[in-house]
Each structure stands twice: as C-alpha cells, then as structure tokens.
Image (cartoon, helix red, strand yellow):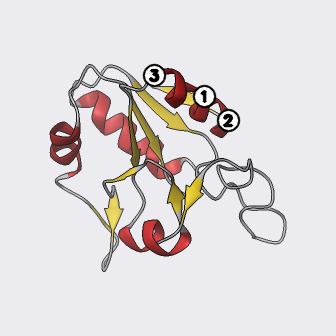
C-alpha cells in the first residue's frame, strides 16, 4: 500500500481517471460531516454498533476490479489503512491510503481540521 498526502491523492486521482476513490467512513460521517467530491461510500466500520463491515471487500470488488487503482480515505487515515490491508490480502494490487484523511489529525486541543487533512488543504468536498 502506498500512502499519499491529501494534495498528492487529489493530483493522483486527476492524473488517473480510472482510479476508484472510496470513503470508508460511516454513512453518518459521509452525509453529515461531508465527503470528498467523487468519493464512493463503502464503510469499513459502521453503526449502530461500530462493527467492521463483513461485506467491505465484496462491495469494493463490485465497484472495481482488483487491478485498478483504489484510493481510500477516512477521517484521519487509520481506518482507511486497515481497509487497504484487507484489500491487499484479497488480491488488490494498487491500493493507496490518504494520510491524515478527510478531517485530519487531532491538535493539542483535541480538534480536527486544524492541522492537516483533505478539508484543511482546501480540496473539493461537499456535504449532503
């Protein structure tokens, strides 16, 4: 798995239109916090019990083939890294993780969006 900073991921997606961009956060995060434009929602972990989605790999396989680039994003880059490992174990060969995710790392006041991340970098996003 390769790791890309948000701006690098955005440029990669622009340069590789065959890539599939997947937001692995929960449906609630995707809808109410916002999401990168063009990202497909396939939760890695979702409510109400915040359990791992046992159908994650199957859903990704339906969305793309194992030899196309897959770019994963979550809130901070941790869930997407774990999801990427699962995809690699399932045979995906071009997996990319967006470091710092959509909202970024926590600052000293335990706030996100103040240090880094997709939104912090001013990349395209929307909220439903």
Quote the CA–CA distance across marks 2 and 1.
6 Å
Q: Split into 4 quadrants, where in the image is the N terminus?
A: top left
Local secondary structure at mark 3: loop
The residue that appears at 52% across and 21% down in the rendered structure is: 15
Nearest the viewer among 125 and 111 is: 125
SS for dot 1: helix
Residue that carries the numbered disc 2 in the rendered image: 7
- Mark nearer the viewer, 2 or 3: 3
Rounded to the nearest angstrom, the CA distance separating label 2 from label 3 is 14 Å
N-term mark: 1 or 3: 1
Q: What residue is rendered at 35% in x and 25% in y?
A: 18
- Asked whether disc 2 touches disc 1, contact meaning CB atoms under 8 Å apart, the reply is yes
Residue designated by label 1: 11
Disc 3 crowd rating (10 Å Cα; few below 14, some 14-19, many 20+) is few
Q: Which residue is mark 3?
A: 16
Label 1 Cα crowd, 10 Å radius (few <14 / some 14-19 / many 20+): few
Q: Please, which residue is most extreme toward the right here?
A: 108
Q: Vertically, is 80 above or below 108? A: above
In-front residue for pair 28/100: 28
- Residue 54 location, x and y as percent? 18, 55
Residue at 45% from the left image edge and 46% from the top image edge:
80
Q: Position of residue 90 (x, y in %)?
A: 21, 30
């Amino acid at each position: 798995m390769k790791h890309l900073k948000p701006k690098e991921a955005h440029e990669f997606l622009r340069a590789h239109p065959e890539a599939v961009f997947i937001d692995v956060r929960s449906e609630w995060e995707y809808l109410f916090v916002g999401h990168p434009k063009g990202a497909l929602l396939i939760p890695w972990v979702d409510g109400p019990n915040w359990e791992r989605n046992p159908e994650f790999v199957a859903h990704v396989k339906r969305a793309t083939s194992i030899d196309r680039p897959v770019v994963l994003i979550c809130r901070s880059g941790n869930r997407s890294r774990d999801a990427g490992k699962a995809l690699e174990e399932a045979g995906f060969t071009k997996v990319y993780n967006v470091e710092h995710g959509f909202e970024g790392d926590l600052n000293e006041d335990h706030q996100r969006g103040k240090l880094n991340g997709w939104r912090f970098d001013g990349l395209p996003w929307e909220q439903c």
